Amino acid sequence: MFRHLMLAMLLAFAGQQAHAWKDITVGDARQTSDCLNETPSDECVTKSGRYVRTDKGTESGTLPVRLLLKRNLPQEDFDALMRKYGMVEGKYHEWFVKAGDKEYYKRAMTLQGLMALDGKTVLLPPEFMRVLPLSDRVAMVQTVKQEWRLATLGSAETVLTPITLPWDRLEWIDGTEPKRPFTLMAIKNGETKTDLRTYMIFDGDGDAAYTISDVIPNTHGADDYYKFYAGYIGFPVRSGGSEFSVIFNRITLELEKMGPVFDILDVGYALTEKWDDNKHDLKYFPFQKIGEMPSGKGLLSADIYEPLSQGEADAEPLTSPKAARGMVPLRLPGQIGGIRGWLIVYENATDQWYKLIMHAPQKDDFYKQETGKWSELSPSSIRVYLWEPNEYLPLADIWIGTIPDETHKALFANANPKDIPPPSYRVAARFFEDPAKKSAGGVTDWYLIGSDPSAENFQKIYDTRAGRMSHPDNPQALATPELIAEMRKEREAKAAYREYIETPWEVQVARAQAEQERSLLGAADNALSSGYGLDFNGDFYYVARTKGGKYLQAYWNKFHQLPHSADAYDICRRFGSSSVECGLVYAWADNISQGQREAAQREAARYSQNQFNKDWNPAYRPPMSEPRCYQTGAKTETCFYN
C-alpha cells in the first residue's frame, strides 16, 4: 500500500514520473511532456528530477538529478554496448523478453543514465536497464545482462563494482522533495512470510547506512515500514522477546528516535448498503499499542491503540473532555476487509466504559474531495467526532462475535461448498442502568443489539430492554440461535441460486410450467371450496378445460356454456369422445354448430334468390356509363344517368 501511496505522490509531482526510475521509455516520457525540448527524438532528459543525498553542504542535504533516456542506438554502438557487458551476439533473446534479431532489441530497449539538473552535464551515460541514484556520487544500476552493480557518477569512465550486501529484493521510495530523498533499501526475507525480516538502507556510497534486523512483517497488506511526512522512516521490531520501534532520519540516515512498537493498520470506510464498492479501498495509518482489552470480546482486537502522528511519528493520545483512553479496531467476518469500526475505550478513576463507532456523521469535517467519500473511520475523523456531542450511549460492556468455527463447520458439514455462507456477526451489550452514574447506578444483563450498530439502535434496545430476552453472563448464548437461523436461510438462498444457474434452460422452463400448473390447481381447489373465483373465462376455466373432472363439472353447473363452442371439440379430443367431459359439452356445442349451419344455409338461399332477381327481373336495368337523353321539343333534350 505504501508503494501505492508513493506512486500517487510521484504522479501528482509530474505526470507519470512514478515510472521514471523504473521502466519508463522515451515514448512514455514524451507522451507525458516530461522531456526537455532540446533533446533529439530518440533521447530524453526528463524535466522531473529526484532529490538525492549530497555532502556538498547544501541547506537541505540533497540535490536533484534528472533521468537520461536513450533508444535506437546506431547498430555499431549497440553491438559495442552488448560486447562491453558480455552479451553474445545473436543470443540477446536469452536475456530479454522474447526471441528476435538485433534490430528488434535495438529499437525496443530504452537505456537509462543520469543527468545533472542543468540538463547538460552527464553524470552517468545511458547504457543501463535501470538506474537507482543513491547520491550525487553513486547509483545502483542494472546492466543489459540484468546484473546489479554500483556505478560511480561524474567520472570520465564509469566504474562498476559488485554489491556486497545480501538481499532478496529491493524497494525504493520517494525522492520528490528535498526532505524526503530517493531512498533505496535491500530486504532479506525470512524463510516464511511471517518470519522476521532484515532491512538495509543504502547510504550515498552504496554501503548499508543502517541494518535493521528483526523487522516485524505487516499482516494487514501494508509495507513493513511507515513513511512519516517529516522525512522519517519507521520500523516495528521484535528482539529478545520485546517489541519496540526504530525511527530513522532519511536525510542524515541516523537513528532519530526509538519508542513503543507501532502497527500499520488497514482502515476501511464505514459499512453502507454498497459496502462492497469500497471493501478493498483501504487507508493505512500508524498506531501504537497502549494496552489490552479484557478477554471474551469476540471479534474485537485484544489490543488498545492510540494513533501516531503521520508527521513526526509522535503519539497522539485521544485524551479529551470525554476521558477517551484509546481505540480498539473491529474487523468483521466474511469478505468485509479492513477495519470497519472502532470501539472507543473510556476510563476515569472508578470506571471503564465503551462506545462503538462504526460510522461518523457525513459532515464537511470528514469529506475527502479527492475521493468523493467521507473518511469516517480515520484517526483524525474519529478525534473530531469524539470532541463533538454525539448520540452514542456509554456501554458497561460489549461483545461482537459470530458462531464458533466448529459450530459453523458442523452446521454445513454436508452442504455444497458453494452454498456455505460466510459467518454473520451480532453485537451484544451491557448497559448502565443510569448512564450518568455509570456503574454506581447499576449494570444490566447482556442484551442482543443485532447487526445494526447505529446509535439509534443502541438507544432503542436500552429503552425497551424490559421486554427483551437477556442473559446474565453469556452474550454468545443470545446470539447463536439468531445467527444459525440467518445463515441457514442464506444457505438455502445460495443453494437455490446455484441450482438455478447450473440447471439447463429447458429444465427451468419445464419447472416453471409445472409450478404454474400447481398454482392454478391450488387456486381452483380454493374456488371449489369457497364458491369464489369460478370465473367465466379466467384461470378457473383454464383448469376446467384442461383438467376436466370436478372442475369442468362445477363450471358447467354454473354456466351451462363455454366461452367458445370450439373448446368443446378440444375437450372431446383431450378426454375422449365417450368421456364424461365430452358428454357434458358436446350436445351444447353440436347444437350451436347445427344452428350455425342452418343459419348459414338460410343466408345462402336468400343471397342466391337475390342474385336471381337481379339477373331476370325486367324492371331491373343495370347502371349505364353513358347518359340517356330524350327529346323535349324546341330542339332540346333532357339527359340523365341511372
Image (cartoon, helix red, strand yellow):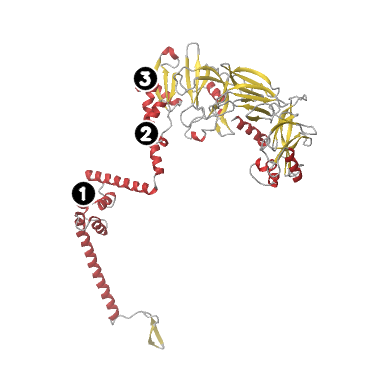
**Closer to the camera: disc 2 or disc 3?**
2
Residue wearing tag 1: 550
- Outermost residue, right direction? 156
- Residue 118 lies left or right of residue 130; in this view the side is right
Q: Where, by quadrant of the figure, is residue 2 drawn?
A: top right
Q: Nearer the viewer, residue 326 or 104?
A: 104
x and y percentages locating residue 189 in the rendered image: 60, 27
- Residue drawn at (42%, 21%), measured in percent from left and top? 429
**Residues packed near mark 3 inside 10 Å, few (<14), some (14 to 19) or many (20 plus):** some
What SS does tag 1 mark?
helix
Residue 215's image quarter? Answer: top right
Residue occupied by mark 2: 414
Residue 256 at x, y percent in the picture:
66, 19
Indicate whether 321 appears above or below 265. Answer: above
In this view, the mark in front (2 or 1): 2
| Residue, disc 3 | 471
Quarter occupied by the C terminus: bottom left
Query: Which quadrant would residue 438 be assigned to in this image?
Result: top left
Calculate the distance from the C-alpha at mark 2 to the C-alpha at mark 3.
32 Å
- Asked whether residue 174 appears in the rendered view, the answer is yes
Q: Mark 2 vs mark 3: which is more N-terminal?
A: 2
- Give the mark nearest the N terminus, 2 or 1: 2
Q: Which mark is residue 600?
A: none
**Callout 1 touching callout 3 (CB < 8 Å):** no
Q: Identity of the amino acid at label 3?
A: His
Of the image marks 1 and 3, the number of the one nearer the N terminus: 3
The amino acid type, in three-letter code, at marker 2 is: Asn
Label 1 crowd bin: few (<14), some (14–19), many (20+), radius 10 Å? few
x and y percentages locating residue 400 in the rendered image: 44, 24
Secondary structure under badge 3? Answer: strand
